[in-house]
Image (cartoon, rainbow, N blue to C red):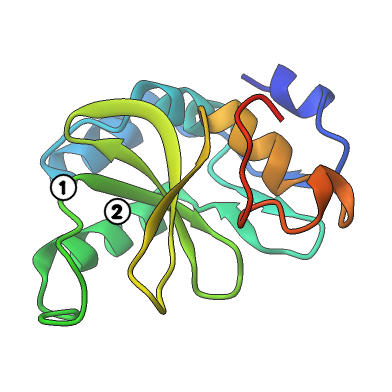
Amino acid sequence: MREIFAGVPGEAELRAPLDGAALGAAERRLGRAVPAQLGALLRETDGVADAYGTDVVWPLAHIVEQNLLFWSGEAFAGLYRPFDALLFFGDNGGGDQFALVVAPERDDVFVWDHETDSRMWVAGGIDEYLRRALAPDGDEGGDRWRYPLRGS
């Protein structure tokens, strides 16, 4: 999975990898499996930060805590549609969060806009998401998350 970063034009801070036991414990807490492509990435690096220190992929402990909070519905009752079908794994530093669809499981990455509760497709998988998230400013034709293009 680290080969993804060789082709990424931006900078990335990679953390120490996770072992299978930590991933298994997290899945038990979540009550569901971590999608395969995210699990493979976490076994290589427990999170990814961009050049500005934004966690474009959160450490596993943060993934677990955030998803348990979102899925409980207690913190957001009446504000947003349910989050049960999503597994959040990173953010843009401005409140919007990125997620994989887990029910039914898909490789596509969506961004959740915390102001409008919209959920918009942004990438066809973790590797494409990382290329876009780590691209230097000005690449990807401007605001890379507002106008996503498949295969860009």
Determine crowd level at label 2: few under 14, some 14-19, many 20+ residues with C-alpha closer than 10 A.
some
Give the mark, 2 or 1, whose residue is nearer the N terminus: 1
28 over 89 or under it: above or below: above
Q: Label 1 is placed on what type of residue?
A: Arg
30 over 146 or under it: above or below: above
Residue 87, horizontal then vertical, whole percent: 30, 46
Residue at 86% in and 44% down? 10
Q: Label 2 is placed on what type of residue?
A: Val
> On the rendered structure, is 77 left or right of 52?
left
Label 1 secondary element? helix
> On the rendered structure, is 116 left or right of 127?
left
Q: Quadrant of the C terminus?
A: top right
Q: Which residue is mark 2?
A: 64
Tags 2 and 1 in contact by the CB under 8 Å rule? yes
Determine crowd level at label 1: few under 14, some 14-19, many 20+ residues with C-alpha closer than 10 A.
few
Task: Report the front residue among 83 and 117.
Answer: 117
Label 2 secondary element? helix
Residue 119 seen by the camera: yes
In which quarter of the view is residue 149 placed? top right
Residue 32, horizontal then vertical, whole percent: 15, 36
Residue 81, horizontal then vertical, whole percent: 17, 66
Q: Which mark is residue 29?
A: 1
Residue at 44% in and 31% down? 38
In which quarter of the view is residue 114 placed? bottom left
The mark total stands at 2
Residue 11 seen by the camera: no
